[in-house]
Structure formats: structure tokens, C-alpha cells
């Protein structure tokens, strides 16, 4: 999946890291919509057309799997991101590409290309 021209929901709870992610996505020609919480992400999903998403696995002590289930039900492709190394996801999301933090353009493109 190419990022150019896509609207991508970026769910990241660390403000500095979310700014870096937003810059990376926009440098690829994507429109980045940033949410710091699951509630903010759900509000954006309800109000905007989203082409794809990147989900931090751990959001302020909550995992993002309920949000992943919502995206999957709506047919929105997504990838996971984690700062804890290779995450072991629930069976329902075992095949979802995962990128490690800190974010970099090469890894983001590679993860989205797997969708």
C-alpha cells in the first residue's frame, strides 16, 4: 500500500513521538490525523473517511486491540507499532504487520506495503 494521497489515522499517546510520526506520514504525501487516545481515534473514525491506520499497541496502559477490531469491522487496513520489541498479538491480529518504534520512514513503508 502506497501512502501518497491517503488519509491515515495515527494513534500514538506520546506527543513528541506523534509529531515525528505525523511529519513522516506527511513527508510521504499522506494526510495524517493524530489521536492520543482510543476515544479520540473513535471520534475521528466517526467523522472522517480513513484509508488506513497505525496503532500504538499500548495507549496509556490500555491496549489498542478494541480499536483494531473496529477498524477491521469497517474494512480499514492498519498496522501496529510498539516500543517493546516484537509484540505477540491476539490470534485475531496475528497477521497484522507491526513496526518498531522509534518510527522511521523505511520501516513504515515496509509495514504498509505488507497490507
Image: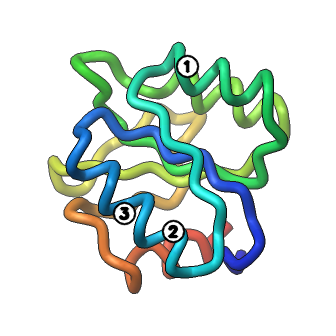
Q: Label 2: how many residues lie within 10 Å, few (<14), some (14-19) or many (20+)?
A: many
Q: Is residue 111 above or below residue 97?
A: below
SS label for mark 2: helix
Q: Which residue is mark 3?
A: 99
Depth check, mark 3 against mark 2: the one in front is 2
In the displayed structure, does residue 13 sit left or right of residue 108?
Answer: left
* Residue bearing the label numbered 2: 25
User: Where, by quadrant of the figure, is residue 104 drawn?
Assistant: bottom left
Q: Is residue 15 left or right of residue 63?
A: left
- Mark-to-mark CA distance, 2 and 1: 24 Å
Q: Residue at x 31, y 26 (%)?
A: 59
Q: Residues within 10 Å of mark 1 (few under 14, many from 20)?
A: few
Residue 66's disc number: 1
The CA span between labels 1 and 3 is 19 Å
- The tag earlier along the polypeptide, 1 or 3, is 1
For the point 29% across and 31% down, the residue is 58
Q: On screen, 71 above or below 27? A: above
Labelled disc at residue 111 = none
Q: Nearer the viewer, residue 67 or 95?
A: 67
Residue that appears at 39% across and 85% down? 106
Please indicate whether residue 70 sits to the left or right of residue 34 in the image. Answer: right
Q: How many marks?
A: 3
Give the mark nearest the N terminus, 2 or 1.
2
Rendered residue at 55%/19% (across/down): 66
- Residue 19: percent from the left, percent from the top? 33, 54
SS for callout 3: strand
Amino acid at each position: 500500500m502506497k501512502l501518497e494521497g491517503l488519509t491515515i489515522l495515527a494513534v500514538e499517546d506520546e506527543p513528541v513521538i506523534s509529531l515525528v510520526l505525523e511529519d513522516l506520514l506527511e513527508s510521504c504525501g499522506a494526510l495524517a490525523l493524530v489521536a492520543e487516545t482510543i476515544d479520540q481515534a473513535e471520534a475521528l473514525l466517526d467523522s472522517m473517511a480513513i484509508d488506513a491506520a497505525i496503532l500504538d499497541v499500548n495507549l496509556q496502559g490500555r491496549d489498542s486491540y478494541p480499536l483494531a477490531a473496529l477498524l477491521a469491522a469497517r474494512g480499514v487496513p492498519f498496522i501496529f507499532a510498539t516500543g517493546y520489541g516484537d509484540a505477540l498479538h491476539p490470534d485475531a491480529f496475528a497477521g497484522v504487520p507491526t513496526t518498531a518504534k522509534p518510527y522511521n520512514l523505511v520501516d513504515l513503508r515496509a509495514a504498509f506495503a505488507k497490507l
